[in-house]
Image (tube, rainbow, N blue to C red):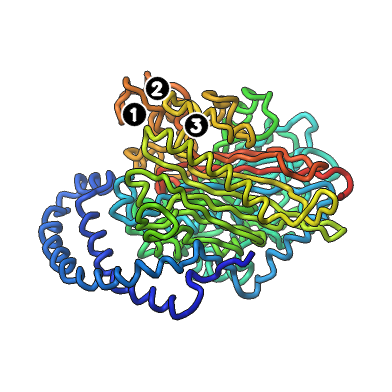
């Protein structure tokens, strides 16, 4: 299957489309600004209340007539542009495939060789997030704003979190398995190319940040790009650090040792921030760095709580190297060991993490509706992901029953080569959702090859279902279509037979915003859908019951800018508490509850509405292989950026002692 690298089959149609959109855009932008000025966010309301000289009403009185006059003047041009733009959509392709060009062009091909070196199997990490990148006026109804700046910052946070090195912690004590500094920690096998051997102890991996030279310089961003380009942590020893823990209780160091390390970090001197595009980003409160904020990993300062506790002694570590070259930030999971003890029957690790997992392989995003924001997001993600598919969907009346003003909002990013892609639009959208081409994106990726040169592939599907509450029937119909499309895509892209398998399927993952949870009484039909008989949900016990550690992924928009949750570290701490979750997560609706959660904490039950899913199946995979969940994480790194919590899952594909 051919992957489409441009939205139109020839340059003439592309130029004509650009011209028509150029006529439409001034009217679109003015309307967006005009409506947005009348929809303030809670942050803006607080800002006005705190600043007596903030004359918002005067600004509206002055700007509204100007916007209206310009809007009226631009309408004739917009109409001409629309008459050109609409029929062109019948020739438009359903997505744009972007591959990073340059010196790191072969990164994906390099990853394919890791499977042969892995021997007994390999792990893959998947992430999913609803980022609410709508036109600014519409995003304000979800209490977020400045879509263009948010898109850039979201991309920076995701790729910085994913490109952090994995810190391998060796615990000498054979009975001590607790980790105090954990961000998506897990028991893992040595990565390909890592020739270090483990002589004793238990090896765990934590995700932390590496800061090299020029940490505080204005060229920090460029230096990282020159060294790694996409930031992928497959450069061998440069992205790996060994942290020995010599058997102190629970792996903690003494206060004296901790103060010594913190003193060394502070002694390295103050660093100037090197955020790219600071002037634009500082316009929103979401990007403001505060003490303990680990959301933007470009910050060269860290709170005492965020510094990893490293033992330096016995002459095994060069002191000047530690002071001058390394600065680690980690999310301290104070309650990790307690939480795991409560759920000892669970077969995999689970946590609330302040960071996206290190070595994130695949990313599925929803609600990337704004085209300009999608370009900014893609530009940032390309620092880490080599392959990206964006601007997914259809416009106008093409292929769907109703007129579509915006695309599906789906975006897919991968470190591994994409072999095939397909998109389908749900034809039964209702209300406001019918104006967007919501649908499903299906992808086939190559993740390796066997010694016999058989391709090892995986399937990933991303979707976004009907959002309007009460549309249970619509969502069930969409789930039916999703299953049919999944089966059709597998059949159309398979080049294997049972007798002569040219391809071996390693995994099949489905993720996205399904807009229903597993606990609400109104969502019983979706909870019992046959999809869950084919795909497994790591957070689910059965219809109507989630596992006790699973939490909701839908945040209460009214509290996005509260001091308690406006940074990743703060939001992580709040969500670890049951009382905190009741204050800042949206809970299943009922007739007895008002729309706001505030003031009704005592009556709320459960852990919030979990509407963002990561599912996997063992059906259709290579028979001799086994797929298991290694880790599952709820991520707070996008605190203040969106009203959803991202989720991540790491799967381990076990092949046995020998490759097939």
Tell me residue 99's x, y (percent).
59, 68
Q: Earlier in the sequence, mark 1 or mark 3?
A: 3
For the residue pair 32 and 176, the one nearer the viewer reads as: 32
Residue 604: image x %, image y %?
40, 22
Q: Nearer the viewer, residue 92 or 182?
A: 92
Disc 2 marks which residue? 604
Q: Which residue is mark 1?
A: 597
Image point (68%, 49%), residue name: 124
**Looking at the image, do the residues carrying marks 2 and 1 touch, with CB atoms under 8 Å apart?**
yes
Rendered residue at 52%/50% (across/down): 440
Residue 526 disc label: 3
Please tell me the numbered disc located at residue 562. none
Q: Is residue 469 left or right of residue 320?
A: left
Query: Could you tell me which residue is drawn at 58 percent across and 35 percent down?
Result: 531
Q: Nearer the viewer, mark 1 or mark 3?
A: 3
Dot 2, crowdedness within 10 Å: few (<14), some or many (≥20)? Answer: some
Q: Secondary structure at mark 3?
A: helix
Callout 2–callout 3 Cβ contact below 8 Å: no
In primary-sequence order, the first of circles 2 and 1 is 1
């Amino acid at each position: 299957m051919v992957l489409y690298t441009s939205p139109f089959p020839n340059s003439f149609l592309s130029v004509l489309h650009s011209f028509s959109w150029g006529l439409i855009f001034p009217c679109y932008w003015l309307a967006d600004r005009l409506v947005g000025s009348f929809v303030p966010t809670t942050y803006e309301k607080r800002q006005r209340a705190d600043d007596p000289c903030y004359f918002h009403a005067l600004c509206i009185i002055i700007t509204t007539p100007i916007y209206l006059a310009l809007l009226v003047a631009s309408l004739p041009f917009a109409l001409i542009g629309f008459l050109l733009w609409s029929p062109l959509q019948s020739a438009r392709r359903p997505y744009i495939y972007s591959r990073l060009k340059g010196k790191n062009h072969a990164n994906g091909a390099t990853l394919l060789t890791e499977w042969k070196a892995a021997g007994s199997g390999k792990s893959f990490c998947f992430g999913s997030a609803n980022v609410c990148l709508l036109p600014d006026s519409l995003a304000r109804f979800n209490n977020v704003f400045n879509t263009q700046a948010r898109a850039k910052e979201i991309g920076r946070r995701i790729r910085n979190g994913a490109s952090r090195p994995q810190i391998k912690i060796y615990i000498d004590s054979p009975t001590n398995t607790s980790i105090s500094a954990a961000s998506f920690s897990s028991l893992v096998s040595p990565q390909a190319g890592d020739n270090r051997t483990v002589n004793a102890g238990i090896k765990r991996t934590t995700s932390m940040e590496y800061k090299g030279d020029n940490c505080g310089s204005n060229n920090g961003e460029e230096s990282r790009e020159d060294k790694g380009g996409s930031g992928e942590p497959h450069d061998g020893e440069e992205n790996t650090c060994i942290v020995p823990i010599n058997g102190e209780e629970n792996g903690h160091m003494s206060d004296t040792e901790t103060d010594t390390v913190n003193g060394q970090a502070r002694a390295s001197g103050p660093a100037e921030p090197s955020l790219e595009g600071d002037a634009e980003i500082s316009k929103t409160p979401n990007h403001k760095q505060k003490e303990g904020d680990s959301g933007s990993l470009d910050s060269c300062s860290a709170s005492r709580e965020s510094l990893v506790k490293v033992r330096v002694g016995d002459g095994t570590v060069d002191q000047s190297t530690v002071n001058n070259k390394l600065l680690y930030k980690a999310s301290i999971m104070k309650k990790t060991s307690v939480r795991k003890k409560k759920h000892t029957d669970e077969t995999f690790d689970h946590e609330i993490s302040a960071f996206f997992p290190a070595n994130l392989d695949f990313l599925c995003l929803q609600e990337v509706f704004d085209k300009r924001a999608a370009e900014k997001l893609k530009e940032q993600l390309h620092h880490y992901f080599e392959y990206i598919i964006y601007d997914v969907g259809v416009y106008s009346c093409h292929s769907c029953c109703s007129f579509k003003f915006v695309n599906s909002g789906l975006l897919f990013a991968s470190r591994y080569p994409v072999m095939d892609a397909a998109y389908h639009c749900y034809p039964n959208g209702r209300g406001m959702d019918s104006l967007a081409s919501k649908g499903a994106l299906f992808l086939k990726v190559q993740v390796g090859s066997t010694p016999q040169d058989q391709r090892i592939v995986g399937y990933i599907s991303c979707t976004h279902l009907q959002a309007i509450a009460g549309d249970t029937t619509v969502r069930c119909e969409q789930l039916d279509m999703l299953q049919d499309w999944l089966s059709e895509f597998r059949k159309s892209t398979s080049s294997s037979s049972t007798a002569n398998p040219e391809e071996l399927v390693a995994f099949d993952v489905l993720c996205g915003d399904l807009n229903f949870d597993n606990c609400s009484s109104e969502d019983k039909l979706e909870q019992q859908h046959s999809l869950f008989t084919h795909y497994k949900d790591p957070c689910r016990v059965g219809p109507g019951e989630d596992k006790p550690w699973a939490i909701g992924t839908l945040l209460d928009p009214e509290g996005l800018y509260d001091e308690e949750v406006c940074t990743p570290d703060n939001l992580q701490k709040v969500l670890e508490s049951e009382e905190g979750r009741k204050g800042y997560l949206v809970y299943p609706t009922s007739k007895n509850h008002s729309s706001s959660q505030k003031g009704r904490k005592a009556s709320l039950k459960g852990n919030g509405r979990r509407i963002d899913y990561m599912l996997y199946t063992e059906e259709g995979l290579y028979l001799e292989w086994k797929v298991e969940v290694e880790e599952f994480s709820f991520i707070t790194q996008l605190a203040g950026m969106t009203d959803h919590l991202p989720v991540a899952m790491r799967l381990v594909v076990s092949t046995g002692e020998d490759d097939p």
